[in-house]
Image: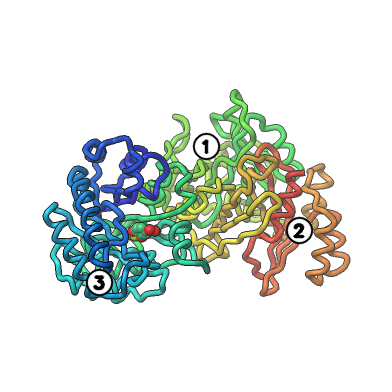
């Protein structure tokens, strides 16, 4: 279906907004009056610019406080409308949105509303314009879509139809099923927006907290199905009022919006996209650095062994049992802080993963990083992380391990790749696996945490959910010493296996001291034993204040001796409502990366978010 976006969704000047909409791939726009008023371009120039960009102007909006008013008011309103219809002729826009009146001068009289809207439509028709009447959720007398439709129906005017807006309909809890009773050709326009569930005044909610479909808590796809069942064939148009979008990069917002519409069409069953291939595990985490020494020293103290080296580049594979970390010193000439730059995700079909990513507008990266590398499907996440789709240990497919040659010969080296099903040749040893791993010491990547810029948080969640097919957990929000800490994890819905990604919002993006850092968390079976080993090997772990342990003692009946051990070792603790337990600790930060070790028991599914403010404060010190 055709896709449009209201200029109010995007930041910048009208020209910047139009350019962003066109670059993202939209077919049309709704022009918001304020954007036009503030533009130095004439309506003709706007029309020409829009056409040059390949966009149509699908709606001009809004006209306010038109209907159900005393005759002398209405005469003035018609005068105002005449000017706007002339403007629309110059713009080449043929549909105007009239939103239900909020004026205290409006009366509660449907037949007067119908009569006046009909006269407005007469005037509109003379100018070749159609009027789409929309119920604002806070309209003075008309606040529901069915009420607006009754008035439009009573008017019975060919140039008067209704505009449906998913926010107004769903925010009030109206049943969208009734939309199917409206003839499709009388639905002149459809505006789509989602919003997180919030307990607040509906006007404030609408003006500040709307988001793109799939980023909030409203069933926008369900509503779309009813609208399509009614026979609507016009554009799907995003109309989002959001303070964060107003400040974010317009190009990114537009792309995020288009992705949300594609995913919405898929959910509503009208757009068959390549099915998601939910990743089954993490093949590796990749750190980029210009100085591999400090992170190598830390990994060594954490029990990792450098087991293999890339055949053509300064990339080392470090492994501790099933946990694999690549340290890429390819940027040696340039100074770059050590950073978590890429993640390899195991998927059943890397090409199918890449096809879905492409269909959802994820930028594809070169399959080979250099000429002699094996070809790997690879995309960029919105935060710049490279995501490689891996098929480790499947002889029929190229594997990232084929680029590596074993350097260490010990048991750890032999266990560096997951579930290798076929024997590979000895010089491709990292994929080999000997069955001698001791169950008491099974290290694997538990999760990867990526700090997101505050104005791209919802974009990142939508990306990982739609492109990778991961399921978001609930959002966790906590007060942080320097702002808000927000965190949202995503995992395969089957949950137990498969990758877990945690998106964290950095409280203060300007500030450093570890808050921008990303991290890799490793799961072990016995955290206390592991940490004793790390300390003996000289690893520096994050120090946690004594007050934290006093509070733990108050909140949980942790056995006496155990608490003392946690206090001594800097281990944090959490327990869920089902009694599941989580023990975790953090290393020092190297560049922009640190490591976490976790021990889960009793089916604990969380990530210890309650401890995040203590962790962040400790990292700042
Ligand atoms: O908040 C408003 O005033 C407003 C204006 C136009 C719309 O289409 C809308 O949904 C809301
Ligand atoms: Mg609207």
Residue 559: percent from left, percent from top: 84, 69
Residue 101 occupies which quadrant of the picture? Answer: bottom left
Extreme residue in the front direction: 72
Label 1 Cα neighbours within 10 Å, binned few <14 / some 14-19 / many ≥20: some
Circle 1 residue: 403
Q: Residue at x 85, y 59 (%)?
A: 565
Residue 12 occupies which quadrant of the picture? Answer: top left
Q: Residue at x 88, y 65 (%)?
A: 561
Proximity of marks 3 and 1: CB atoms separated by less than 8 Å:
no
N-term-proximal mark, 3 vs 1: 3
Query: The residue tagged with tag 2: helix, strand or loop?
Result: strand
Per the model, the C-alpha gap separating discs 3 and 2 is 58 Å
Per the model, the C-alpha gap separating discs 3 and 1 is 64 Å
Using the image, tell me which numbered label, if any, was put on residue 572.
2
Residue 524 occupies which quadrant of the picture? Answer: bottom right
- Apparent side of residue 522 relative to residue 397 in the rendered image (left or right): right
1 or 2: mark nearer the eye: 2
Q: Residue at x 80, y 57 (%)?
A: 528
- Of residues 2 and 278, the one nearer the viewer is 2
- Apparent side of residue 140 relative to residue 530 in the rendered image (left or right): left
Establish if 299 lies above or below 242.
above
Ligand 2: which quarter? bottom left
Question: Looking at the figure, which quarter contains the N terminus?
Answer: bottom left
- Of residues 119 and 262, the one nearer the viewer is 119
3 or 2: mark nearer the eye: 3
Circle 3 residue: 149
- Of residues 16 and 111, the one nearer the viewer is 111
N-term-proximal mark, 3 vs 2: 3
């Amino acid at each position: 279906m055709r896709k449009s976006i209201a200029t109010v969704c995007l930041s910048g000047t009208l020209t910047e907004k139009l350019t962003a909409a066109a670059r993202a791939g939209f077919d049309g726009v709704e022009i918001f009056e304020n954007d036009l008023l503030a533009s130095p371009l004439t309506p003709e120039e706007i029309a020409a610019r829009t056409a040059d960009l390949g966009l149509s102007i699908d709606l001009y909006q809004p006209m306010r406080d038109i209907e159900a008013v005393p005759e002398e008011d209405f005469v003035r309103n018609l005068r105002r409308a005449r000017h706007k219809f002339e403007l629309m002729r110059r713009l080449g826009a043929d549909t105007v949105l009239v939103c239900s009146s909020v004026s205290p001068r409006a009366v509660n009289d449907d037949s007067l509303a119908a009569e006046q809207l009909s006269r407005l439509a007469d005037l509109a028709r003379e100018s070749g314009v159609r009027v789409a009447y929309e119920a604002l959720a806070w309209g003075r007398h008309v606040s529901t879509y069915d009420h607006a439709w009754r008035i439009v129906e009573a008017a019975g005017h060919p140039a008067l139809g209704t505009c449906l807006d998913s926010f107004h309909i769903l925010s009030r809890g109206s049943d969208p099923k009734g939309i199917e009773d409206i003839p499709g050709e009388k639905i002149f326009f459809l505006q789509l927006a989602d919003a997180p569930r919030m307990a607040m005044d509906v006007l404030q909610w609408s003006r500040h907290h709307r988001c793109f479909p799939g980023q909030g808590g409203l069933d926008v796809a369900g509503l779309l199905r009813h609208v399509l069942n009614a026979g609507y064939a016009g554009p799907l148009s995003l109309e989002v009022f959001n303070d964060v979008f107003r400040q974010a990069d317009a190009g990114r917002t537009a792309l995020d919006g288009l992705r949300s519409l594609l995913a919405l069409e898929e959910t509503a069953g009208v757009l068959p996209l390549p099915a998601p291939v939910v990743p089954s595990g993490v093949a590796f985490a990749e750190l980029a650095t210009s100085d591999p020494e400090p992170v190598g020293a830390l990994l060594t103290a954490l029990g990792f062994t450098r087991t293999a080296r890339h055949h053509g580049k300064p990339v080392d594979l470090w492994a501790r049992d099933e946990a694999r970390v690549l340290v890429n010193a390819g940027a040696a000439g340039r100074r770059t802080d050590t950073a978590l730059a890429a993640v390899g995700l195991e998927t059943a079909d890397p090409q199918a993963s890449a096809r879905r990513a492409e269909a959802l507008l994820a930028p594809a990266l070169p399959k080979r990083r250099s000429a002699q590398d094996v070809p790997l499907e690879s995309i960029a996440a919105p935060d710049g992380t490279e995501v490689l789709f891996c098929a480790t240990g499947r002889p029929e497919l190229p594997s990232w391990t084929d680029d590596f040659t074993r350097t260490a010969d010990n048991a750890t080296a032999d266990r560096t790749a997951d579930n290798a099903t076929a024997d590979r040749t000895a010089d491709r040893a990292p994929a080999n696996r000997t069955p001698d791993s001791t169950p008491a010491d099974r290290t694997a990547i538990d999760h990867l945490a990526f700090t997101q810029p505050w104005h791209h948080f919802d974009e990142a969640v939508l990306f990982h959910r739609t492109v990778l097919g991961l399921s978001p957990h609930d959002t966790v929000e906590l007060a942080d010493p320097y702002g808000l800490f927000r965190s949202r994890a995503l995992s395969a819905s089957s949950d137990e296996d498969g990758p877990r990604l945690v998106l964290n919002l950095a409280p203060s993006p300007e500030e450093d001291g570890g808050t921008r850092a990303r991290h890799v968390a490793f799961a072990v079976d016995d955290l206390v034993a592991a940490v004793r080993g790390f300390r003996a090997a000289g690893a520096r772990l994050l120090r946690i204040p004594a007050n934290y342990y006093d509070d733990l003692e108050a909140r949980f009946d942790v056995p006496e001796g155990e608490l003392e051990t946690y206090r001594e070792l800097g281990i944090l603790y959490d327990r869920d409502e089902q009694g599941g337990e989580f023990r975790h600790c953090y290393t020092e930060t190297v560049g922009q990366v640190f490591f976490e070790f976790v021990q889960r028991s009793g089916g604990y599914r969380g990530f210890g978010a309650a401890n995040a403010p203590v962790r962040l404060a400790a990292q700042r010190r």
